[in-house]
């Protein structure tokens, strides 16, 4: 059962949660063709994705994204952690800055993942979410490409 395979990533002893094999700290789950839209062209389908990032000290950070191709509308939600820490950031193993205020403890995160799977991709109600559009500017900073970073002048 998939539940048995995923549960240890969230409910393992302290410091052993998540999987960082291969240097990765992020993964996701998606469901396509919801509400009878599977036979439609991709743009007309209803699709959801649960993006996940793990941090050994902070827990898990999720972004839930839903595209409803029937009405051409996208909604996006983030886990609601300690919002007083939105301006603090940690970097993912890929260098993506992640707001500390959007992390939730691993056991709490597990409830959401389990519910996501059990409801075929509905937004889990077992944890609190905040619409990404309601978050302040700067919550999702875009890292500059290496060519734009300040570097010391070459020695020649």
Image (tube, rainbow, N blue to C red):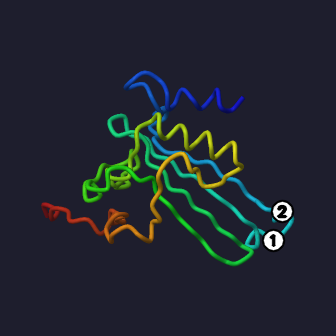
- Residue 124: x, y in percent? 58, 50
Closest to the observer, 132 or 24? 132
- The quadrant holding residue 32 is bottom right
- Find disc 1 in the rendering and name its residue: 41
Q: Would residue 36 appear left or right of 116 to someone viewing this image? A: right
- Residue 87: x, y in percent? 25, 59
* Residue drawn at (15%, 65%) of the image: 153
- The quadrant holding residue 66 is bottom right
- In three-dimensional space, the C-alpha distance between marks 1 and 2, rounded to whole angstroms, equals 12 Å
6 in relation to 99, above or below:
above
- Find disc 2 in the rendering and name its residue: 36
* Residue drawn at (21%, 65%) of the image: 150
Quarter of the picture containing the N terminus is: top right
Badge 2, how many Cα within 10 Å: few under 14, some, many 20+?
Answer: few
Closest to the observer, 87 or 20? 87
Disc 2, SS: helix
């Amino acid at each position: 059962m998939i539940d048995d395979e995923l549960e240890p990533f969230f409910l393992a002893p302290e410091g052993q949660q998540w999987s960082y094999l291969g240097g990765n700290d992020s993964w996701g789950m998606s469901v396509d063709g919801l509400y009878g839209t599977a036979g439609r062209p991709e743009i007309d389908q209803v699709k959801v994705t649960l993006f996940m990032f793990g941090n050994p000290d902070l827990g898990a950070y999720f972004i839930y994204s839903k595209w409803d191709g029937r009405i051409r509308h996208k909604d996006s939600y983030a886990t609601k952690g300690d919002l007083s820490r939105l301006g603090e950031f940690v970097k993912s193993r890929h260098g993506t800055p992640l707001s500390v205020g959007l992390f939730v403890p691993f056991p709490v995160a597990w409830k959401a993942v389990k519910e996501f799977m059990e409801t075929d991709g509905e937004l889990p109600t077992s944890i609190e979410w905040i619409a990404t559009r309601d978050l302040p500017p700067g919550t999702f900073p875009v890292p500059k490409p290496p060519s734009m970073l300040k570097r010391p002048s070459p020695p020649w």
